[in-house]
Every structure is written in C-alpha cells, then in structure tokens.
Amino acid sequence: MAQPIPLHERHFSALALRLYAECPLRFRRRYVDGLAIPGLPDDPEERRAMLQGERFHLMARRYYSGLEPGTLGAPADRAELEDWMQKLVRYLPRRPGYAYYPELELRLSEPALRLVARFDLVVVAPDGEATIYDWKTLRHMPPRAKLEAAFQTTVYRYVLCAAGGAYAPGGAFDPDRVSMVYWNPLRGGREERLPYSAARFREDGRRLRQLVAQILATPPDGFPPTGDPRLCARCEYRQLCHGPLADRPLPEPGDGWPEAALEPGQEVPVEDEEPAGAFDADPDGLAGLPLP
C-alpha cells in the first residue's frame, strides 16, 4: 500500500477530480487509503493498445524535443507506430519561431486551489497564441460534447492560463487565445479543437474551487460508493466492494442494463493519465463526466 499524500497537500489532477465525481469511494481508496492495484489489462488486444499508446506518446515527445522519434516494439507494432508518426508530422510539423513543450507539467498552488496538469504538448506561437495537444489512440473517440465537458479539458486549459505564465511571451496566456486539441492518428487522423475564453476561465475557476473545497471538507467516512453498476463493473476495486463474484462478465443488453451502456465508445476514458510520481498505478478510467 502506497503512502498517500494528505488531501490538503495534494495537487489534484483531472483524473482525481473525475474519480471523485464518478465514485467518491473509488477516489478514497486511491487517494486517501493509498491502495494501488497495478497491472495491465487481461485482454491481449487491450494490453497491446495501451502499450502502443505509450510508445506513440514517447515517439511524439522525442520528435517535439528535436530528436529522432526512433522505433519501438515488434515489427508489426513498429509499422503501426511509424504510420501514426508520419500522420502526426504531416498534421503538426515543427515550425521555426514556435515554441514546443512536450510532456510539460504545471502545478497551480493557490491556497484554495491546488491543481496539476501534464500536457502531451503545448505549442506557443510567436504572437503568444497557445495550443494544448493531447494524443488519443482510442479506437472509439468520445464525442465532442464529452470532450468539452471532460475534467481533462477543464483542468488543462485552466492550469495553463493560471500557472503557465513562464511559457507565455507576454508573461501570461490570454484565455481567448488558448485552445485544446485532441488528436487521434487512427482513421487518417482526427482533430477536435476546443477554444477557450476569459468567461469560461472565470467560471472554471469558480467551479474547480467549489469542488476541491467539497473534497477537502469530506470526512474519511463520507466517501459513498457510486450507484451506477456500469462504473462498478469496470473498477479495479470491485472485489473489495462486491466480493469475488464482481469479476463475472458484464451483463448483456436486455439483462436490466441500458443497451447504450455497451455501445462502442461510450465508456472510453478521457482523463487517462496522472502526472509522473503522483501514484504507483494508473488503472483504466471511465468516460469523463462534467463538473457537478
């Protein structure tokens, strides 16, 4: 069991906030109790997809650091990764005069709001316009509305504007000139560009402070479980809550579960990373939910 960071000392990631919104008990097991359950998915295809995503992130980091991306994995894996990288370089080539910050981690340390974000890439134009890029290698991308409402979108854009001044030519980023882009190399490359604004920045700050204050005011026995069985079925702690039978297969549509719950793309994660060193394991998440 990992030694957890006290909540009042923790910088909350987008993933942490989402887990609290989905299931406070899951949040408690992970961030209060420090219970880590590491490991890769049992399904070979899911395991391969996860590893390919990690390799692609590393190759993209190398490229935007000015290095050769290199090749990773078995021959079949390398062929797929090289195809993804070729699409990425065509989509977003390095340009003179632009600043590229791959795997940039920023921490906001206000008395009432401590947040952390690790960006796949931040690109700053000479005139100060900033774009956050996040690489997704999911077979089924969430719809635009889900990406817009995701904690990752909220936290990343807010943290860049609130804590990224050292990387801005003028000393601070203007929210009206900040965007977040989710890009997926599959199916020819897909972009979802989500512009920010000063009004949204102010509203995000209010809502994030409210949510963090709620978490910090919660007593240890005040983290209830979710009431959604779909979340339980995909949770790494399900056996602790429901016993050995929790590992039975998911019910088929018609067994009392909405058919939409099992449609492709409905339960893919949006916030799928923790900053380096934040926790020992990064179990699969679920679909991002909007701030309450």
Image (cartoon, rainbow, N blue to C red):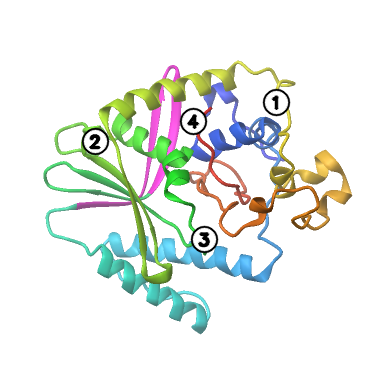
Q: Which residues are magenta?
A: 99-119
**Residue 173 appearing in the image:** no
Residue placed under numbered mark 3 in the picture = 140
Q: Secondary structure at mark 4?
A: loop
Residue 71 locus on image (x, y percent)? 42, 76
Distance between the alpha carbons at the discs numbered 3 and 2: 36 Å
Q: Residues within 10 Å of mark 1 (few under 14, many from 20)?
A: some
Seen in the picture, residue 85 relative to 240 is either above or below; the reply is: below
Relative to 275, say whether 227 is above or below: above
Q: Quarter of the image holding residue 205?
A: top left
Is 115 contained in the magenta span? yes
Residue 282 in percent (x, y) is at: 60, 49
Residue at 33 percent of width and 29 percent of height: 200
Compared across the picture, whether 205 is left or right of 212 comes to left
Mark whose residue sits in front, 1 or 2: 1
User: In 3D space, how far apart are the residues under numbered discs 4 and 1 (Cα atoms)?
Assistant: 19 Å
Say which of marks 3 and 2 sits in front. 3
What residue is pinned by disc 1? 223
Residue at label 2? Answer: 166
Is residue 189 at all visible to an observer of this figure?
A: yes
- In front: 252, or 73? 252
Disc 2 residue crowd, few under 14, some 14–19, many 20+, Cα 10 Å: few
Pick whichever, 205 or 263, lies toward us: 263
**Would you call the spot at circle 4 few (<14 residues within 10 Å), some (14-19), or many (20 or more)?**
many
Question: Quick one: label 3, few (<14), some, or many (20+) residues within 10 Å?
Answer: some
